[in-house]
Image (cartoon, coloured by chain):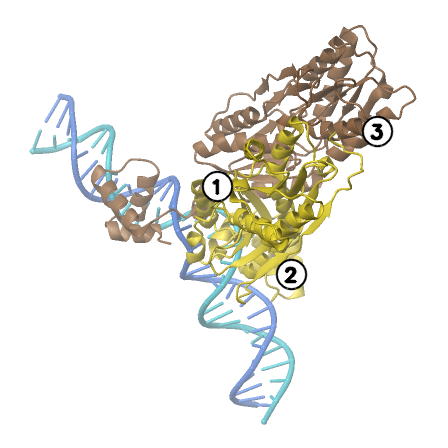
Chain colours: A brown, B yellow, C cyan, D blue
Amino acid sequence: MATIYEVAKLAGVSPATVSRVFNSNNVSEEKAGLVRAAAAQLAYTPNRTARTLRRRHSEIIALIIPDIENPFFTSLARGVEDAARSAGFSVVLCNSDEDVAKEAQYIDIAVLENMAGIIIAAASDASDLHPLLSRSRPVVAVDRGPHGLDIDAVMVDNRAGGMAATSALVTHGFKRIGCITGPSDVETAQHRADGWRDGLRSAGLTPDEALLEHANYRVDGGRAAMQRLLALPEPPDAVFVANNLMSVGALQVLYDTGSSPETFGFAAFGDLPFAALAPAGMTVVHVPARAMGRTAATMLLDRINGDDRPPRTVVLRNEVSTNPENALAHVR
Amino acid sequence: MATIYEVAKLAGVSPATVSRVFNSNNVSEEKAGLVRAAAAQLAYTPNRTARTLRRRHSEIIALIIPDIENPFFTSLARGVEDAARSAGFSVVLCNSDEDVAKEAQYIDIAVLENMAGIIIAAASDASDLHPLLSRSRPVVAVDRGPHGLDIDAVMVDNRAGGMAATSALVTHGFKRIGCITGPSDVETAQHRADGWRDGLRSAGLTPDEALLEHANYRVDGGRAAMQRLLALPEPPDAVFVANNLMSVGALQVLYDTGSSPETFGFAAFGDLPFAALAPAGMTVVHVPARAMGRTAATMLLDRINGDDRPPRTVVLRNEVSTNPENALAHVR
DNA sequence: CCCACTTTTGGAATCGATTTCAGGCAACTA
DNA sequence: TAGTTGCCTGAAATCGATTCCAAAAGTGGG
């Protein structure tokens, strides 16, 4: 690896001039040409570590997500990558595994490695972002909000989505609608359940809290919760499931009992993984994961470039659709 | 952020001694105590960038995978993380998207950022690892082999797995067995197809190359290939699908036609995402993704710590199982 | 033609650690 | 007791860029 000194020597200029050629542009075209030729000849690339040490921040963005195995978050990651890469930044992905301690470690790493900024879908309400803020690293919260911290955020309207999904079930004639939502210390879980309550009330129904299950946002959690619901003395006739993976689990249970979304109302928040699996009769609140990632990255890059307007929260719209009843059911 | 100089001053020693306390241990217990106290008081953490600049490598491992949305690779990533974290290394995940150019960029970044080592599942036979080797960065190939390069590798026996899966179909009485494999420039795809041929031949059948489809290792590829197979004048009565995502697509098509793995033989290489979805009658070659990741990371860490034995290739065993015909089919 | 001003340029300091080198000191051998 | 050995320690060099500062060169106005 050639260094800036070797380039400088070959070009007959000082290292300072070489640096300026690659950064600011206060260099005469003549010397710049010499430098570029020398750099090309030596296949010079600036040492990023040295640059980071001096500049005090790298060209890397950390993206901390709670579950790498959830396709929602991997789509989101792709969105972040799209925007970051086209701005010359790289993205490193950190999987906090819904574990606040592991998350805290990754936050530390992001700070210690002088990463340019952090996009985070917080593991829980208890997530501690202060190490970032106290060192004034740019942060954008995504999917899950900034619990009272005054930082940028990109969200969907979880409450409205939950309500729309529930209303769709009401429209289809279901009366006793249950809800499987996420962990009670996760904001999106709370809001989606609120949306469920809204949807029922706006139809003149009373939410029955006995039909509300909290689970872990994963397939097994969805299975267990669905089993509990169906085992009730008076089971529901429909269910709103608050995320994609739990929907997969709940669907499995539903099929096990010989039922299907055509007879037992089923609405899901979030696209099912491998979308074509979504069965007939099922209502889905589509979440624009990739767009969320792109938006968050764009906001973060603005901050990195010195944008110091007051923090904003961007709420992206989510669309609701119901698969036609008479379509060929792929999962049949 | 406190620096090593501030700690040194507070402890009344030289910066060199502070450094030694945290690295080698040739320091008297007396001074070490002073240093540790001072460090604790100032909440000192070494600046990783400075350390990397001097040491010429960081404590970060790059993991480059071709498809972040494939649960196989995310499991593998978790395995890598398990091993790396317990050795004090962090893992950054890079998604090459099966694109050799994007992969090359990530390889460059890994080098430029002085990452400690790289674990890579190569995008294709054409992947170029020379930038790594020429700078003698430790590299471990995982899942997809080192195409003639003399480096460590962690693999499964793709050919044996393909053969076992095909043989299972033969055992179940299927005669005209097709194969959907991956891109023709991807090694695993070639070997799994070879296994299919082996399985047929060992049963006295002749592989019919017209029943061999190449697709892109993703859901849509599996759908398309399965459709082509079923549209043949003489379609197969069973199929061996060479990866998990294509299996999902192929299954969708199968169900669309009103068939199922109980009547149309179906064997898959790799566990289906959300395992409980695997339907009755289906044969699965289980791939130990997480163990592969752990193994690869362990080998890489050995290399980083100076292990210079000749490169090894570790082949992990994969198990084959067939879901009982009479089980409750979850996907029904 | 001279002075003030801007644009280029190079020297040297800086970022924050690690590591080499050599000196000081204590312990051990003969 | 003198000489050898080995352990601790600190001063200073080093990793490879960026950037401050001041000097040099160029520009334009009067």
Q: Which amino acid does label 3 sit on?
A: Gln
For label 1, the residue is A56
Q: What residue type is labelled 1?
A: Arg
Which quadrant of the figure contains the N terminus of chain A? bottom left
Mark 3 or mark 1: which is in front?
3
- Viewer-side residue, A332 vs B257: B257
The answer for which chain carries disc 1 is: A
Q: Position of residue B287 (x, y in %)?
A: 65, 48
SS category of the residue bearing label 1: loop
Say whether residue A287 is left or right of residue A232: left
For label 3, the residue is A227
Q: Which mark is residue B210?
A: none
Say whether residue A26 is left or right of residue B301: left
From what the image shows, is residue A158 above or below residue A87? above
Q: Which amino acid does label 2 sit on?
A: Ala
The answer for which chain carries disc 2 is: B
Which quadrant of the figure contains the C terminus of chain A? top right
- Viewer-side residue, A193 vs B279: B279
The answer for which chain carries disc 3 is: A
